[in-house]
Amino acid sequence: MEEDIIKKEIESSIPPTKKFIRVWRNKWITASASSIADFIDTYEKLAALMKRWKSSGITLDSDIFGGVGDDYAQFCTYDEAVAIEEKFEEDCYEFNPFKSHELSKLRWNYL
């Protein structure tokens, strides 16, 4: 009995294996706006989308270096049903810091 409880605790602490992402670009969001009403409509729709994503458990991807300061944001979920509904794609990149070639890529790209 105690072993089952420990096993469940361990299993629940292991993160899901599939991660789904969506890259979001903020630039050009209001490029076609021709009035203040267009701006209001665009931002209200975006606010509704972000609220829906938040209530579905979608978050900003904490694995991304640099945050959202460059007009891009990456959102993620581990829920496949949510990913399908919101048109997210499976994250195919696997970072393994214990592989020396990945450490060298990281060093040259981010330092």
Image: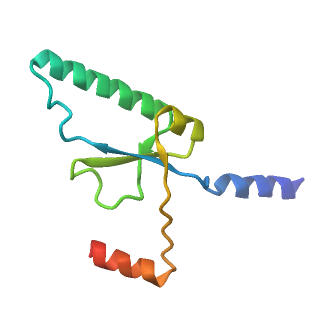
Residue 81 left/right relative to 4: left
**Residue at horizontal 9%, vertical 21%?**
34
Q: Looking at the picture, how far across and down is residue 10, in whole percent?
A: 71, 58
Q: Residue at the location (51% across, 32% down)?
A: 85
Q: Dividing the image into 4 quarters, which one contains the C terminus?
A: bottom left
User: Which residue in the rendered view is the most extreme toward the left?
Assistant: 35
Which residue appears at 68% of the width and 51% of the height?
12
Q: Position of residue 58 (x, y in %)?
A: 46, 40
> Is 35 above or below relative to 63?
above
Residue furthest to the bottom in view is 100
Give left or right: position of 104 versus 38.
right
Q: Residue at x 37, y 82 (%)?
A: 104
In-image side of 1 versus 25 (left or right) = right
Image coloring type:
rainbow
Q: Residue furthest top?
A: 37
Image location (x, y in percent) of residue 24: 32, 43
**85 over 27 or under it: above or below:** above
Where is residue 108 drawn, in percent x and y?
Answer: 29, 78
